[in-house]
């Protein structure tokens, strides 16, 4: 049940429309206004659920003005739901200026729990979830992108990024350049959609996947990078590379033995790392 003079943050599906919650539907039905990142996009969603509602736009180019206008309406006793095109508003999406202003004005702000690509991807990634850093989108400029990734060289927490399809292959190349080939990463592609795929392994494996087929670079991506502790640092990257290569042709036990001999390493440890690589 929606109350007047409240701003509701309403997450919407990131692919599968069935992921909308009953509470989100009720709220969208009952509020006086829906502030949407793109009203045309949101109309399609509302139409699908047969919701008749008054919408107005709130995006990065008009958020300042809209925030003032919406706060006044909220202070006058009206209720507002904030939605973005997909997922949780404010998470790499507009809404921060509005929420901050509402808080400053003492307006009640309630966030509904719901879909968020970063959290969904992280929970299924198989990488440590106890400590993570959400980084949003990496900078577009190459130098800035490299610098942003350099921060991960010593970070032990898992890092979560959003990335555009046109940049994903290039970004993986930069990850390889800055963090090496053996760092464990996961690419969550098209979450909750028909062709949902999780590609996990070391950087080399993910790079190879992307270059195999142009279709592999299409769609929406969350990139998750393991913290530096999760990578077996005692093993030289060349040894890991050889282990990965040999494993495609030989049983793991044999591959581990060859690499152990070549690099003077313990074969049991290599066997264990091989198993972990295959799990991802
Ligand atoms: N606010 C949204 C959320 O809560 O997830 C994120 C909005 S941000 C503008 C859009 C980015 O989220 C995409 O470029 C992609 O990186 C990620 N994303 C959104 N939907 C996705 C999906 N179904 N699968 C994978 N990544 C997704």
Image (spheres, rainbow, N blue to C red):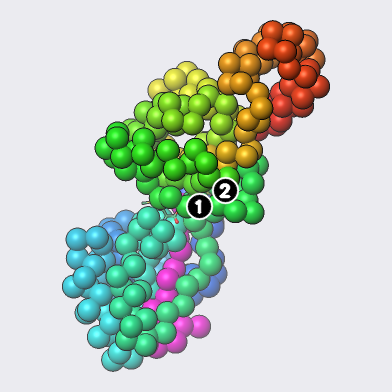
Say which residue appears at 60% left-offset and 29% top-offset: 201
Nearer-N-terminus badge (1/2): 1
Which secondary structure, mark 2?
A: loop
Q: Is residue 10 above or below residue 200?
A: below
Which secondary structure, mark 1?
A: strand
Percent of width and height locating residue 75: 30, 89
Most extreme residue toward the bottom is 76
**Quadrant in the rendering for residue 63:** bottom left
Q: Give the range drawn in magenta.
A: 1-14
Of residues 232 and 125, the one drawn nearer to the viewer in this rendering: 232
Of residues 213 and 256, the one drawn nearer to the viewer in this rendering: 256
Q: Which mark is residue 210?
A: none
Predominant SS of the magenta segment: loop
Report if residue 44 is visible in the image: no
Residue on which the image places disc 1: 133
Percent of width and height locating residue 230: 64, 38
Say which residue appears at 27% left-offset and 85% top-offset: 73
Say which residue appears at 74% left-offset and 8% top-offset: 261
């Amino acid at each position: 049940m929606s109350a007047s003079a409240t701003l509701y943050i309403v997450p919407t599906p990131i692919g599968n429309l069935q992921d909308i919650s009953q509470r989100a539907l009720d709220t969208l039905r009952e509020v006086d206004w829906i502030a949407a990142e793109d009203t045309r996009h949101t109309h399609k969603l509302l139409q699908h659920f047969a919701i008749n509602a008054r919408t107005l736009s709130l995006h990065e180019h008009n958020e300042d003005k809209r925030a003032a206008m919406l706060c006044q309406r909220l202070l006058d006793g009206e209720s507002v739901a904030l939605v973005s095109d997909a997922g949780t508003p404010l998470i790499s999406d507009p809404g921060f200026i509005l929420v901050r202003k509402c808080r400053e004005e003492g307006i009640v702000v309630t966030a509904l729990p719901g879909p968020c690509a970063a959290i969904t991807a992280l929970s299924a990634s198989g990488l440590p979830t106890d400590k993570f850093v959400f980084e949003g989108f990496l900078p577009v400029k190459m130098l800035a992108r490299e610098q942003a990734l350099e921060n991960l060289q010593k970070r032990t927490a898992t890092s979560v990024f959003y990335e555009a399809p046109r940049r994903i292959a290039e970004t993986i190349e930069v990850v390889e350049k800055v963090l090496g080939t053996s760092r464990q990463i996961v690419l969550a592609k098209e979450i909750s959609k028909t062709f949902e795929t999780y590609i996990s392994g070391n950087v080399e494996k993910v790079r190879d996947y992307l270059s195999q087929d142009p279709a592999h670079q299409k769609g929406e991506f969350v990139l998750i990078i393991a913290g530096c502790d999760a990578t077996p640092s005692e093993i030289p990257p060349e040894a890991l590379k050889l282990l990965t290569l040999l494993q495609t042709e030989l049983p793991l036990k044999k591959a581990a033995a060859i690499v152990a001999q070549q690099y003077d390493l313990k074969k049991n440890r290599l066997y264990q790392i091989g198993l972990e690589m295959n799990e991802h």
